[in-house]
């Protein structure tokens, strides 16, 4: 088993939380994990990416080479295009449909969507609406994790266990809200 995942978005969208859940689920299953992240501008709204490599064998590099990502999980649609050169020919993009317009010349949303549609196998997720349906817009990232779950290579029940572990210190209500958000994304 080898999975190369790029998680992309902008600061404040919970990219590192998604990576932490996947890391924990992988380690709970005895898998090897390497992760590297880049924080653009080191602030809320700056580009953030996480390279996440999971394998049942030893991993020697934490960075994913161009053309080798199995999954691009984008919490912001333009960010999915930024990492398109990393996607393998059989890879998939799972992206939120909601744009985070943090630059003056942000491209037209329809043109971004069209480029994604013609470039790769893809899944569009209205994560904002799904997060609001569970009562917390902050669960947007966990909705996206649920939508990407079928492409991660770790069972949904194992990802749910990791969510429960990661959020346990915040109380049962937060755990349950995040599990519901994950399931909404999974059912998307």
Image: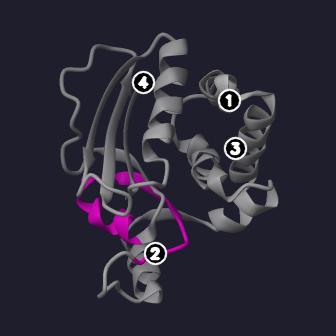
**What segment carries the magenta color?**
78-101
Q: CA distance from mark 1 to mark 3?
A: 17 Å
State the mark number for residue 86. none
Quarter of image, res 65: top left
Please give the name of the residue rendered at 41% of the width and 78% of the height, measured from the top-left corner: 101
| Residue identifier under label 4 | 1
- Judge left or right: residue 16 versus residue 85: right
Element under disc 2: helix
Q: Is residue 42 above or below residue 106?
A: above
Q: Earlier in the sequence, mark 1 or mark 3?
A: 1
Q: Earlier in the sequence, mark 3 or mark 2?
A: 2
> Dot 1: few (<14), some (14–19), or many (≥20) neighbours within 10 Å?
few
Q: In the rendered image, which residue does mark 3 sit on?
A: 182
Disc 4 residue crowd, few under 14, some 14–19, many 20+, Cα 10 Å:
few
Q: Which residue is mark 1?
A: 170
154 versus 118 height, above or below = above
Q: Position of residue 35 (x, y in %)?
A: 31, 31
Residue at which label 2 appears: 117
Badge 4 or badge 3: first in the primary sequence: 4
**How far separated are the C-alphas under marks 3 and 2?**
24 Å
Q: Which label's residue is closer to the chain start, 2 or 4?
A: 4
Determine the CA span between mark 1 and mark 4. Answer: 33 Å
Name the spot of residue 27 as percent of width and height, x first.
Answer: 48, 15
Q: Counting residues from the N terminus, which is met first, the one under dot 1 or under dot 4? A: 4
**Residue 161 visible at all:** no
Label 1 secondary element: helix
Q: Is residue 57 magenta?
A: no
Classify the position of the C terminus by image quarter: bottom right
């Amino acid at each position: 088993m080898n999975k190369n995942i790029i998680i992309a978005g902008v600061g404040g969208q919970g990219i590192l939380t998604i990576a932490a859940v996947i890391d924990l689920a992988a380690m709970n299953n005895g898998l090897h994990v390497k992760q590297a992240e880049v924080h653009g501008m080191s602030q809320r709204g700056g580009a953030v990416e996480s390279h996440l490599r999971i394998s049942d064998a030893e991993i020697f590099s934490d960075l994913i080479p161009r053309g080798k990502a199995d999954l691009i999980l984008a919490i912001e649609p333009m960010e999915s295009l930024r990492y398109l050169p990393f996607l393998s020919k059989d890879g998939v993009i799972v992206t939120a449909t909601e744009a985070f317009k943090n630059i003056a010349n942000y491209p037209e949303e329809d043109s971004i969507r069209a480029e994604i549609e013609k470039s790769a196998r893809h899944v569009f997720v209205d994560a904002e609406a799904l997060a609001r349906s569970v009562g917390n817009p902050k669960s947007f990232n966990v909705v996206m994790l649920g939508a990407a779950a079928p492409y991660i290579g770790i069972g949904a029940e194992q990802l749910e266990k990791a969510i429960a572990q990661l959020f346990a210190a915040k109380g049962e209500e937060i755990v349950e809200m995040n599990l519901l958000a994950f399931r909404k994304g999974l059912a998307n």
